[in-house]
Every structure is written in C-alpha cells, then in structure tokens.
Image (tube, rainbow, N blue to C red):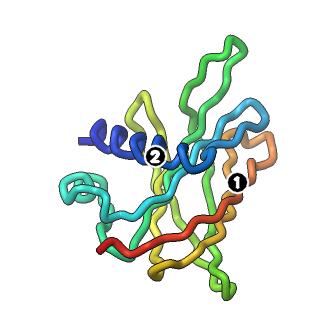
Amino acid sequence: MLKFFTALVCSFALVNSVQAEQSQTQNGYEVHYNAFNSGFLTPEVAQANGLTRSKVMALLNVSVLKVEDDGSKRPVNALVSGEAKNLIGQIKTISFKKIDEGDAIYYLGSFRFSDEELLNFDLDVQPDPNQSPITVRFSQTFYEDR
C-alpha cells in the first residue's frame, strides 16, 4: 500500500513540475516538494497512512535527497517544519509525519484551506544538523474538490 502511495505522490510531482519547478538544491541536498488536495487520495491509501481525505484539506509532501560526489542521489532524513500564511496574515502551522519506505523517505503535513485560497509557504528543511536549514518558499492556490 505504501508503494502505491509513493507512486501517487510522484504522479502529482510530475503534474506540478509541468507548472513550475518544485525542487531546490542547496549544500549538496535536493529538496522536492508539492502540495495537493487530499481528496485525490483513495480512501484505502488515506486510511493506511493515517491521512484525512476532505475537499478542504490538502497535503504538503517534502522529500530530501543527498547528492553524492558521483552524481547519484539517495533519500535522507531531515527535520522539516513549516507554515502557510494566507493573504490576510492568518498562519497555519504544519506538522509533518515521516514516512519511510526504505528506498524513499518523505514528510507529509496536512492543513485546511478555503476555496480559492492563496497560501504562501515557508519551510525549513534541515538534513544536516551541522548546517543551517534550507529555506523553501512558494505560493499556491487551493480549490475545493467538488
């Protein structure tokens, strides 16, 4: 079931990458991220991963890859924290849940939104405790699943 979830998240990453680059590279790490309406999950996948499906709930997916000297990449653990702010300044703190499938590690956070709400995200991603966190900022508009 988890492998299916990985495929689902990857498919959303591909769709979103057509719209805009959804990754950032810094200090030898690639941070990949995407956000999507939780209604896209099947009930089985949501239940297996303890996630809530709703037309007004979204998921933020973050994964971190270490870029090795030979150019290969491997998933790594990281401390991930973040928040979303709407246009009137309301802040939504996002708590992340780690999902480790062995060959893939990602962090999922869920949050509520209003229809047609533009959210500005600020994330701190820290794969190496000896380095400053990588700051990721992006904006996205969310729509209720109808």
Which quadrant holds residue 144?
bottom left
Marked residue nearer the N-terminal end (1 or 2): 2
Q: Secondary structure at mark 2?
A: helix
Residue at image position (46%, 49%) is 98
Crowd band around label 1 with a 10 angstrom C-alpha radius: few (<14), some (14–19), many (20+): some
Residue 44 location in percent, x, y? 19, 54
User: Residue under circle 1?
Assistant: 136
Task: Using residue 83 as the reference point, say whether residue 52 is left or right of it.
Answer: left
- In this view, the residue farthest toward the left is 44
Q: What amino acid is at disc 2?
A: Val
Residue 15 location in percent, x, y? 46, 46
Which quadrant holds residue 94?
bottom right
Q: Nearer the viewer, residue 54 or 134?
A: 54
Residue 117 location in percent, x, y? 53, 78
Q: Secondary structure at mark 1?
A: strand
| Quarter occupied by the C terminus | bottom left
The numbered disc on residue 15 is 2
Q: Nearer the viewer, residue 121 or 21?
A: 21
- In this view, the residue farthest toward the front is 18
